[in-house]
Image: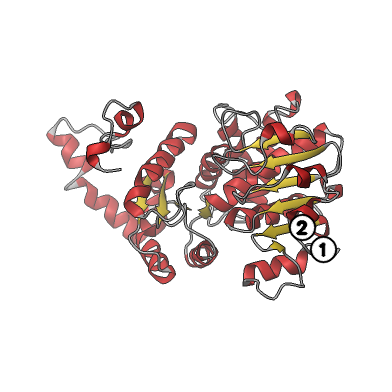
């Protein structure tokens, strides 16, 4: 689409004209005294204090409530590798969600490089300006290394939302679905269709939350991941060593045979016959957008609880239920990193919001539920203190 083909009357383009963000001042600048306090000469005293005690940056700058939303534009929504400029509207939108739901200020940083070393070096150089780093829409497997290296290098939280945000909300939804069906997480036989960033993170999160890894089978585009495969990346090889204890081989149809749970994070279509092979009264989370792996109407023929990633169906698995509160809690605790315990606490808090009103079409809260972010923030801050990563 060129500029000449953009419909200026289209409400989407009207809303985005000029961008969705602006910088505003939090202090008055109407008198000479205001100017002398906010800028020179008064600001010099604050600079000297921070130079003497760097921890004061949390108290006297925006660091304590600001995160960077960083992308290289390589895996944007369902659009793929569209580059940093085309990714900017999404990153602006992410920043708006941070502000709206958790009063966290966020700055989009779209990098014109997809080299892991350059991304890591750039974010490390930018880090003193922020209290946390939200990595966004970076393709697998590079995203794993980027997050790992930044997490090791920086004294502030680093969180790849495509991995962990999705995983937290999936765990929350599965916990409530299991409760509704009078099942225990540890007894569920789970198939994860998709072994990209989200699929691997979901698998790890479910295990951290109580799912038995020996009862989990993960599939990628070539079929079931297991020790029999010689074509696996390092990350997938680790999965092969901890899941698929029965040594299953074949495609997703075989993986679903007798399964209680399907979690689709692949974008590929799954035939009705494969879903029909699941254990009766199970759970289907078909999360690909805009087209779920299994049509929700088809899934409902075989499953007791169905969730998607779409807003026009019940049980939307939406990252906005997780990331604003996760960062709000991490910033409030001045956490140095985000631990597995903090992620599990976030999932428990999300699940708890609707614990008293569970139904087949209500295993997670609405993304617009105002109770979610405060509950998640409080749980995450508490877990940060429990895990020994809080500085506040």
Front residue (pair 250, 288): 250
Image mark for residue 217: 2
Q: Is residue 225 visible?
A: yes
Count of picture labels = 2
| Occupied quadrant, residue 127 | bottom left
Q: Is residue 61 visible?
A: no
Q: Residue furthest bottom?
A: 230
| Contact check, label 1 and label 2, Cβ < 8 Å | yes
- Secondary-structure class at tag 1: loop
For image coordinates 28% across by 31% down, the residue present is 7
Compared to residue 218, the image places residue 63 above or below, namely: above
Compared to residue 99, the image places residue 76 above or below, namely: below
For image coordinates 69% across by 70% down, the residue present is 237
| Occupied quadrant, residue 217 | bottom right
Q: From the top left corner, tell me how far across and down residue 313 is, in percent.
A: 62, 29
Q: Residue furthest left?
A: 32
Relative placement, left or right, of 234 versus 283 is left
Front residue (pair 191, 31): 191
Q: From the top left corner, tell me how far across and down residue 60 is, in percent.
A: 35, 46
Image mark for residue 90: none
Compared to residue 78, the image places residue 29 above or below, namely: above
Q: To which residue does mark 1 refer?
A: 248
Front residue (pair 161, 26): 161
For image coordinates 64% across by 44% down, the residue present is 293
| Quadrant of the rendering where the N terminus is positioned | top left
Colour style of the rendered protein structure: secondary structure
Compared to residue 117, the image places residue 299 above or below, namely: above
Q: Residues within 10 Å of mark 1 (few under 14, many from 20)?
A: some
> If you read the primary sequence from the N terminus, does the residue marked by circle 1 or circle 2 appear first?
2
Q: From the top left corner, tell me how far across and down residue 199 is, in percent.
A: 64, 54
């Amino acid at each position: 689409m060129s500029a000449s083909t953009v419909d200026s009357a289209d409400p989407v383009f009207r809303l985005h004209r000029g961008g969705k963000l602006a910088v505003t001042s939090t202090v008055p600048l109407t008198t000479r005294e205001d100017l002398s306090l906010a800028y020179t000469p008064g600001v010099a005293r604050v600079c000297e204090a921070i130079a003497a005690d760097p921890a004061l940056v949390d108290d006297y700058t925006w660091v304590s409530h600001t995160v960077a939303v960083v992308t290289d534009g390589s895996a944007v929504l369902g659009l793929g590798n569209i580059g940093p400029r085309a990714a900017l509207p999404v990153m602006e939108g992410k920043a708006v969600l941070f502000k709206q739901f958790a009063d966290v200020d966020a700055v989009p940083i779209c990098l014109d490089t997809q080299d892991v070393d350059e991304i890591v070096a750039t974010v490390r150089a930018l880090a003193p300006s922020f209290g946390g780093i939200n990595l966004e829409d970076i393709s697998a497997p590079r995203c794993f290394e980027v997050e790992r290296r930044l997490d090791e290098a920086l004294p502030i939280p680093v969180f790849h939302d495509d991995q962990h945000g999705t995983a937290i909300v999936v765990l929350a939804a599965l916990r409530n679905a299991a409760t509704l069906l009078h099942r225990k997480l540890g007894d569920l036989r789970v198939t994860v269709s998709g072994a990209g960033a989200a699929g691997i993170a979901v698998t790890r999160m479910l295990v951290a939350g109580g799912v038995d890894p020996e009862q989990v089978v993960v599939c990628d585009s070539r079929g079931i991941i297991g020790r029999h495969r010689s074509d696996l990346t390092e990350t997938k090889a680790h999965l092969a060593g901890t899941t698929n204890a029965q040594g299953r081989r074949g495609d997703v149809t075989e993986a679903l045979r007798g399964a209680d749970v399907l979690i689709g994070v692949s974008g590929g279509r799954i035939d009705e016959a494969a879903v029909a092979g699941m254990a009766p009264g199970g759970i289907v989370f078909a999360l690909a957008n805009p087209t779920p792996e299994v049509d929700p109407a088809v899934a409902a023929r075989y499953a007791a609880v169905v969730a998607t990633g779409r807003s026009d169906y019940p049980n939307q698995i939406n990252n906005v239920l997780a990331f604003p509160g996760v960062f709000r809690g991490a910033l409030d605790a001045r956490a140095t990193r985000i631990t597995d315990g903090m992620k599990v606490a976030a999932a428990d808090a999300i699940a708890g919001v609707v614990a008293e009103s569970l139904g087949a079409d209500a295993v997670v809260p609405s993304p617009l539920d105002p109770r979610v972010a405060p509950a998640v923030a409080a749980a995450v801050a508490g877990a940060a203190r429990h895990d020994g990563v809080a500085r506040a």
